[in-house]
Image (spheres, grey):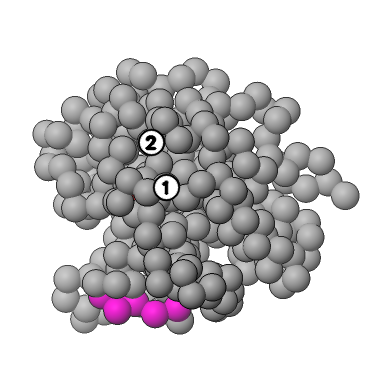
Amino acid sequence: MTTAARRPVMAGNWKMHLVRAEAEAWCAEVRAGLPAGRAAEVVVFPSFPLLAAVSAALAGSGVAVGGQDLHAEAAGAFTGDVAGRQLADAGCTWVLCGHSERRRDHAEGDELVAAKARAALAAGLTPIACVGETRDERHSGRTFDVLARQLEPLPDDSRLVLAYEPVWAIGTGETATPEIAEDAHAFLRERLARRTGEAAARAKRILYGGSVTPDNAGALARQGDLDGFLVGGASLDPKRFLAILTSLAAPEAALRGSP
Ligand code: 13P
């Protein structure tokens, strides 16, 4: 059976960093350094106040822009929140849902994350839904239970991208080994296959995030079920961002999931 090839994704999550001048300098440097004929889709996730400026600075570059969060409702009296439609209006085509920092700091549960992913799709945005276990959960042997629980309510939609981000690897400098990452990705793909069938599971893009650097990206990128990166700290430096992107360079024929 033929399946759609999985085009890798290089995503930079700036979190609560950079102001406009810094963001625009980043865009200029990344634009200038983008490899020609790159295999990966490239997307950056700035804070809300930077979105319009970054969208303008990246216009025509092929680098997409996304929001770091959205509200599950399309509009309404929700002070401080942002709707998918507003993100799209600011130039976004992507959005993060359920990042572990939102789950931790804003008490976002699995059902809310799933509702946000549905809202993103309804607004025409590509959601990256983040899943991942804490250090305690890993050490007590609950990793796969946690991943299955977080995956369960997410919508079955081919546009949705998953990101495996083990919480213990985020911002700690302690990256998952390629084997740990591959195990988790393969588990997620297997669960998806049971739910949506082999073909849809094989076509699903699953990114890895957690202390990705130019030094460890190559070995991670070689794992068969790993379809790109969601990078925090190292994405702030254009040179490191571009170096990680280069690790995803692959001839079209070698795209993951190709029949
Ligand atoms: P770091 O790359 O800084 O570990 O952050 C990963 C992350 O949370 C990306 O969303």
User: What residue lies at 23% left-to-right and 45% top-to-bottom?
Assistant: 52
- Marks 2/1 in contact by CB < 8 Å: the verdict is yes
Please name the amino acid that badge 2 sits on.
Answer: Thr
Mark toward the viewer: 2 or 1: 1
Above or below, comparing residue 189 to residue 172 in the picture = below
How many callouts does the rendering have? 2
The magenta segment: 106-110
Viewer-closest of 55 and 259 = 259
Viewer-closest of 66 and 101 = 101
Above or below, comparing residue 92 to residue 29 in the picture = below
Q: Which quadrant of the figure has residue 249?
A: top right
Q: Position of residue 31 (x, y in %)?
A: 34, 24
- Which residue is the site of mark 2? 213
Classify residue 151 as left or right of residue 78: right
Q: Residues within 10 Å of mark 1 (few under 14, many from 20)?
A: many
User: What residue lies at 71% left-to-right and 59% top-to-bottom?
Assistant: 201
Q: Is residue 36 visible?
A: yes
Above or below, comparing residue 207 to residue 120 in the picture = above
Q: Is mark 2 within 8 Å of ligand 1?
A: yes
User: What residue lies at 62% left-to-right and 63% top-to-bottom?
Assistant: 188
Viewer-closest of 27 and 192 = 192
Q: Position of residue 97 (x, y in %)?
A: 40, 64
Residue furthest to the front: 139
Disc 1 secondary structure class: loop
Please name the amino acid that badge 1 sits on.
Answer: Thr
